[in-house]
Image (spheres, rainbow, N blue to C red):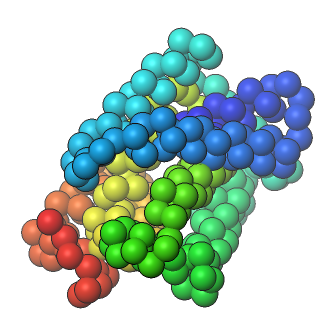
Amino acid sequence: MLGGITEFLLIKHSLPIGISLLISSIFVAVVAIIIHKLFISKTKNANELSLIIMTIGISITLRGIVGIVVDKNAHPVKAFLPFPSVNVLNLTFSSQYLIVISTALLLAFVLYFYLKKTISGKIMQAVSMNSLAASLFGIDVNFVQMSSFAISGFIGALAGAIIAPISFVQYDMGLMFGLKGFAACVVGGFGNNNGAIVGGLLIGAAESLSAGYISSSYKDLIAFLIMILVLFIKPSGLFSSKDVERI
């Protein structure tokens, strides 16, 4: 949401799309660092549930601030490419989907390379698995966690900015995307980045088919029906790793 709103305001002030994307993503990454610094790192002996509740509260607060400072209207953002639509096999869709798909694939590759092939990425995974053991090996756990917040903020802002021409931007646009992203993680399996991508593709394809063959009114319902179905069949997700413990 912050990425999409910031991009809209920058483009409104005649900044080029590429520069507005970069500035909005960096801005939200800084906001994420501030959130970690002021709230997450200051919380002592917090469990996962309390941190989840805290970040939900922060999310609601941010939506309220944006609703007051900007407004609560839905604003259109022009497509990034000069041609408005693409026709493939007699199927016509917005050219912005090309940007969304290519960006998602690029980010997936970059994240995979970073986490699997770099020392800092492996350190981040180690902190995620066991922060106490990582700190005993001399790793600055607080800095690594702050870095993960910055990366998440950057990616979230970039996602919101590139989806803006398709869905419009408004103060609460991130809520449904966040819920569907959670559903994609559940379907793919927590702890499996590739599974989350496949889960997102499955949900997206099912939503499009349901909108075309049933009704667009039920489109948002499909994601959660698929999630519930997967939880019944395989609670750990379709591509879950055996070495990941879930509670």
Query: Residue 57, located in which quarter of the rendered image?
Result: top left
The residue that appears at 85% across and 45% down in the rendered structure is 19
**Quick check: can you spot residue 192?**
yes
Please determine whether, in this image, residue 73 is positioned above or below residue 36.
above
Horizontal arrangement in the rendering, residue 239 relative to residue 228 (left or right): right
Horizontal arrangement in the rendering, residue 64 relative to residue 221 (left or right): right
- Pick the residue in front: 19 or 97: 19
The residue that appears at 80% across and 26% down in the rendered structure is 12
Please determine whether, in this image, residue 74 is positioned above or below residue 209.
above
Horizontal arrangement in the rendering, residue 66 relative to residue 5 (left or right): left
- Pick the residue in front: 127 or 2: 127
Place of residue 61 in the rendered image (x, y in percent of width and height, measured from the top left):
42, 24
Quadrant where the N terminus sits is top right
- Pick the residue in front: 147 or 69: 147
Place of residue 161 in the rendered image (x, y in percent of width and height, measured from the top left):
66, 44
**Quick check: can you spot residue 160?**
no
The residue that appears at 10% across and 69% down in the rendered structure is 232
Query: Residue 40, located in which quarter of the rendered image?
Result: top left
Place of residue 114 in the rendered image (x, y in percent of width and height, measured from the top left):
61, 77
Query: Residue 247, located in which quarter of the rendered image?
Result: bottom left
The residue that appears at 62% across and 83% down in the rendered structure is 118
Place of residue 207 in the rendered image (x, y in percent of width and height, measured from the top left):
38, 57
Please determine whether, in this image, residue 150 is positioned above or below residue 230.
above
